[in-house]
Amino acid sequence: MFGRYDAGASPISSGGIQSSLLFLVNGTRQAASVPANNASAVAVGDDLTVTYTSNGTAALTQLALGQTDGSGFRLEVASTGARVPATVSLASNVVTINPSANLAAGTIYQLVVTDGAITQAVDANGTASASGVKRPIQGFTTTFRTA
């Protein structure tokens, strides 16, 4: 499986393959979003979070935003694809997406996390390492509806 890789100002050339992608795999590397996929009645003023763990509880370490401005995390109106302005921050293993204004009520949104939106420094075995090489983590999309 290959996905789009957010390389920011240095996109890979056409036809290039992103082979260093770290995949989301239960027990190794997981991402949980709040609100959860297909959640309904989400409060319009809530922030969104994505928590990266190895097994659902143990925090992944050595993480960094793929783009310092957080542009790999996009909040969009699902029906139109219109981007919702938001700030993105990383604290430990939790990415917080804070919309600039309250979301519209009764609207379906999607959070698109591109491949490489978050990176992890790993050694040759794929184990987190402060002296390791930053490798992109697989992205995903989640959809939710506001109250």
Image (cartoon, grey):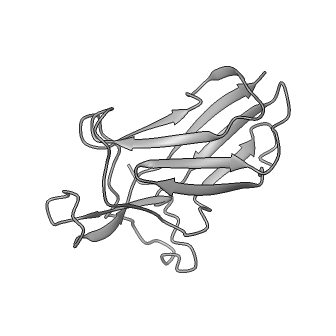
Question: Which residue occupies the foreground of this view, 143 or 129?
Answer: 129
Quadrant that contains the C terminus: top right
Question: Which residue occupies the foreground of this view, 126 or 64?
Answer: 64
Looking at the image, which residue is at 20% across and 58% down?
126
Classify residue 42 as left or right of residue 125.
right
Q: Quadrant of residue 107?
A: top right
Q: Quadrant of residue 8?
A: bottom right
Measured as percent of width and height from the top left, residue 22 is found at 32, 55
Instruction: Count the numbered circles shown.
Output: 0
Reply above or below: 102 against 21: above
Q: Quadrant of residue 51?
A: top left
Reply above or below: 59 against 14: above
Looking at the image, which residue is at 82% across and 43% down?
80
Classify residue 142 as left or right of residue 41.
left
Measured as percent of width and height from the top left, residue 34 is found at 56, 32
Classify residue 113 as left or right of residue 43.
left
Looking at the image, which residue is at 48% across and 75% down?
12
Residue situated furthest front in the rendering: 91
Measured as percent of width and height from the top left, residue 118 is found at 45, 58
Measured as percent of width and height from the top left, residue 38 is found at 61, 23
Reply above or below: 70 against 54: below
Residue situated furthest left in the rendering: 125
Looking at the image, which residue is at 64% across and 32% down?
143
